[in-house]
């Protein structure tokens, strides 16, 4: 079948066969099918959608476009978040799960748009390397129980090309395309069990709860089709997670959680997601038991021990990291104060995330560099009472101009009133 016939079939609402999807994906990766034809096909998928068989075929093709890792003899589990603001969960989660005996090959992404990236946060640790060969990942799984690394040139090249094209053709927000993109990467990294943290709210990719639910269902079903056990939690991203939004600032908060402290919401999510991972990894008989086990390794230092081991094994300078805790801040500090007394009703995660981009926490374009020492400290969060003139947030910037602009944006993110807001962190579990 010619490529144009595949486009027409999808444009008219037809269901593509695995062979048709393979011709398109393989041809595109090989450079034989041009961008304009794939762009037309993506738009047809965007409007017509895809059935479960098509999503599964697309995921398989994308996954097999490059190297697929496997760790024979290890039952590996991983977590994937759809992205948020202040989402540093992976940092304490991987060592905590590893400390409970479940290996975690954690392939993560970088900051893009208003959301942060695990790799950028870890690379703010002096010397820490995230470019690892499959052999190094395997060695690290043996030595410290987990590895944190990025996608290499050889892994899932189809997603790299397709994602870049979706980004410039208005076809990112498509549930089948997002599902295939996420699953192709997660299934290529060698994990048998997957936990998805699907964010919803202003700082999330899926702003509406019903869209987040649909994506969660699609990810769980798609993962099962590919022989992986999976569960998804839909979680709140209407305000930043924890109090810190930044790269090293978030490493600091992760270390607090790894030492048994830290903000309650971050610890709770680490325990809930970690509990799910321990059940999938066969180390806990119930979610309750899994959560309790994660809480124990956070409190007794075993999770922190794993973290220290991993930081050293991936080239990080542990002593320097510890010396910088609580001190490494960009030089220009701006405080955002409450203009009236009341209860914090909202801290808009999207606006705080955009302020982060202005400061250099995240990037507007893939090739932009990020800064390690800048960010936003949300001193007050939703539901907390504040007096007039009290500090709501602090902005850490490299220069006055960016400090000014970011502080204005953070000020706009806060709403202070008389109503006490409600809302839970975990909104739904889909298995
Ligand atoms: N994250 C991904 O990896 N892919 C998408 O398509 C969207 C979010």
Image: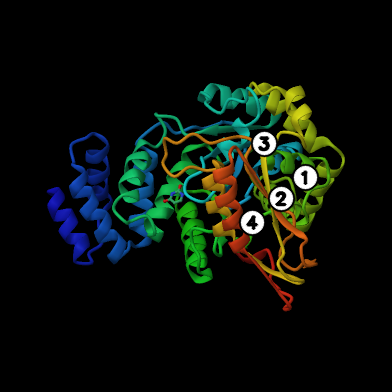
Q: Are marks 2 and 1 in contact (CB under 8 Å)?
A: yes
Q: Residue at x 69, y 46 (%)?
A: 282
Q: Can residue 84 be seen here?
A: no
Q: CA distance from mark 4 to mark 1?
A: 16 Å
From the viewer's perspective, is the residue at label 4 or at label 2 nearer? 4
Crowd rating for badge 2 (residues with CA inside 10 Å; few <14, some 14–19, many 20+)? many
Query: Is the CB atom of the residue marked by disc 3 within 8 angstroms of ligand 1's nearest atom?
Result: no
Q: Which of the two residues, 357 or 221, is positioned nearer the viewer here?
A: 357
Classify 157 as above or below 312.
below
Q: CA distance from mark 3 to mark 2?
A: 31 Å
Q: Which residue is mark 1?
A: 257
Dot 4 or dot 1: first in sequence order is 4
Dot 4 or dot 3: first in sequence order is 4
Query: Residue 270 got which mark?
Result: 2
Q: Which structural element holds mark 1? A: helix
Q: Which structural element holds mark 2? A: helix
Dot 2 or dot 1: first in sequence order is 1
- The percent coordinates of residue 222 (x first, y second) are 45, 55
From the viewer's perspective, is the residue at label 2 or at label 1 nearer? 1
Query: Residue 331 got which mark?
Result: 3
Crowd rating for badge 3 (residues with CA inside 10 Å; few <14, some 14–19, many 20+)? few
Q: Residue at x 33, y 61 (%)?
A: 50
Q: Is residue 374 left or right of residue 12?
A: right
Q: Is residue 242 left or right of residue 158?
A: right
Q: Which residue is mark 4?
A: 240
Q: CA distance from mark 4 to mark 2?
A: 15 Å
Q: CA distance from mark 3 to mark 1?
A: 26 Å
Dot 3 or dot 1: first in sequence order is 1
């Amino acid at each position: 079948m010619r490529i144009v016939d595949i486009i027409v079939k999808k444009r008219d609402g037809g269901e593509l066969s695995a062979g048709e999807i393979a011709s398109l994906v393989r041809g595109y990766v090989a450079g034989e099918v041009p961008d304009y034809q794939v762009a037309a096909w993506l738009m047809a998928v965007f409007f017509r959608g895809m059935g479960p068989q098509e999503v599964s075929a697309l995921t398989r093709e994308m996954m097999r476009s490059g190297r697929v890792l496997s760790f024979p003899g290890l039952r590996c589990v991983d977590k994937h978040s759809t992205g948020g603001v202040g989402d540093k969960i992976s940092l304490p989660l991987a060592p905590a799960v590893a400390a409970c005996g479940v290996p975690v090959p954690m392939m993560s992404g970088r900051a893009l748009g208003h959301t942060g990236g695990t790799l950028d946060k870890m690379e703010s640790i002096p010397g820490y390397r995230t470019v690892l060969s499959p052999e190094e990942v395997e060695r690290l799984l043996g030595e410290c129980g987990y590895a944190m690394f990025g996608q290499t040139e050889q892994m899932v090249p189809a997603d790299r090309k397709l994602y870049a094209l979706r980004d410039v053709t208005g076809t990112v927000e498509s549930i089948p395309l997002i599902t295939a993109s996420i699953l192709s990467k997660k299934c290529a990294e060698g994990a048998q069990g997957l936990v998805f943290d699907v964010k919803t709210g202003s700082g999330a990719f899926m702003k509406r709860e019903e869209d987040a639910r649909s994506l969660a269902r699609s990810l769980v079903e798609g993962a099962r089709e590919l022989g992986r056990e999976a569960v998804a939690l839909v979680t709140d991203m209407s305000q930043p997670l924890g109090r810190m939004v930044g790269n090293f600032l978030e490493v600091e908060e992760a270390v607090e959680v790894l030492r048994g402290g830290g903000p309650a919401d971050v610890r709770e999510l680490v325990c809930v997601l970690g509990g799910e991972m321990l059940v999938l990894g066969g180390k806990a008989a119930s979610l309750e038991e899994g959560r309790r086990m994660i809480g124990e390794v956070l409190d007794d230092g075993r999770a922190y021990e794993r973290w220290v081991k991993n930081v050293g094994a991936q080239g990080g300078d542990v002593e320097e990291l510890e010396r910088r805790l609580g001190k490494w801040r960009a030089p220009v500090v701006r405080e955002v104060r409450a203009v009236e007394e009341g209860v914090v009703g909202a801290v808009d995660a999207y606006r705080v995330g955009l302020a982060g981009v202005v400061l250099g926490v995240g990037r507007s374009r893939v090739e932009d560099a990020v800064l390690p020492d800048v960010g936003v400290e949300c001193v007050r969060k939703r539901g907390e009472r504040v007096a007039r003139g009290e500090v709501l947030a602090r902005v850490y910037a490299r220069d006055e101009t960016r400090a000014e602009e970011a502080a204005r944006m953070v000020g706009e993110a806060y709403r202070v009133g008389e109503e006490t807001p409600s809302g839970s962190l975990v909104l739904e579990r889909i298995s």
